[in-house]
Image (cartoon, rainbow, N blue to C red):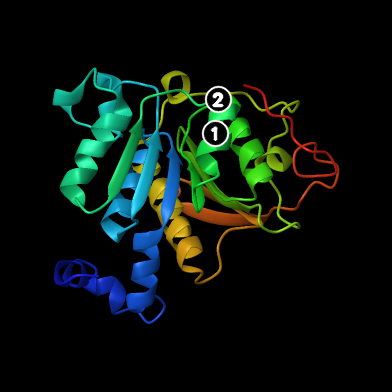
Amino acid sequence: MNDDQLLRYSRHILLPQIGIEGQEALIRSHVLLVGAGGLGSPVAMYLAASGVGRLTICDGDEVDLTNLQRQIAHSTDRIGTPKAHSAKKTLAGVNPDVNVIALDERMTEGRLLQLIADADVVVDASDNFPTRHAVNRVCTIRKKPLVSGAVVRFHGQVTVFDMRHAYSACYHCLFPVNGESEDTRCAEMGVFAPLVGMIGCVQAAETLKILLDIGENLNGRLLLLDGLTMGWRAIKLNKDPVCTVCGIHEPVITE
């Protein structure tokens, strides 16, 4: 690290769990972020501020006026701009040393298979079940840790699926494709603006802990937040032994 980096990251370096070696590890790391909206905004901004060296942001949507109530990486003057590029511009102001790769495209499983291979951690900040399941299947194949978050109305959830460990559950264990969960987006159900920041910050923290190999991450625990009572609770998340993604079968990739 140069003198400017030592100063920029001095508050991290003061932490014995991080220090200079940990900060250098962050600078060498690569995170793949799927989604640059409500959750992806705080995730991207805190990862960039923390010094993650390379950040690939995937989002095929454009900034819309309705996004600005909660998607803090974007601004009014960027309405109509691809979200990935808008986020990159914001992050350049936060930390110009971070190499941000903005991909204005919708992710297929084949494309994810390429991108995830080179990532140390994958963060799912998407807003729909098909994308979440696609990311999960590829992370299972590539044995990559996946930090997953979701928010709707006044409720949020966040967990880690660390596919480097055979005992880890995956997203499909929690929400099987043939389950009864409905794919409800913010446009249909609404979302309390600060809640995406709270869940996104937890996702960023879990990502940094994995990269630094410190503390105890949320693998095996689902953290739930009720924004109306500000009550947090954690439930144990077990692997489904007959899961068709992480169980006895190999997941099938579709283009």
Residue 230 lies left or right of residue 194; in this view the side is: right
Q: Which residue is mark 2?
A: 108
Q: Amino acid at mark 2?
A: Thr
Left or right: residue 155 compared with residue 241: left
Can I make out residue 98 in this image? yes
Q: Quadrant of the C terminus?
A: top right
Q: Provide residue 35's location: percent of width, then percent of height.
A: 42, 34
User: In which quarter of the view is residue 195 placed?
Assistant: top left
Q: Going by the image, does 67 lie left or right of 132? A: left
| Residue plotted at (40% across, 31% down) | 191
What label does residue 141 carry, if any? none
Residue hosting label 1: 112
| Tag 1: amino acid | Leu
Q: Quadrant of the N terminus?
A: bottom left
Q: Secondary structure at mark 1?
A: helix
Q: Secondary structure at mark 2?
A: loop
Give coordinates of residue 13: x percent, y percent. Answer: 29, 76
> Does residue 230 appear anywhere in the picture?
no
**Looking at the picture, does residue 114 appear above or below residue 204?**
above
At x 57% / y 55%, what residue is drawn?
233
Closer to the camera in the image, 40 or 194: 40
Dot 1 alpha-carbon crowd within 10 angstroms: few under 14, some 14 to 19, many 20 or more: many
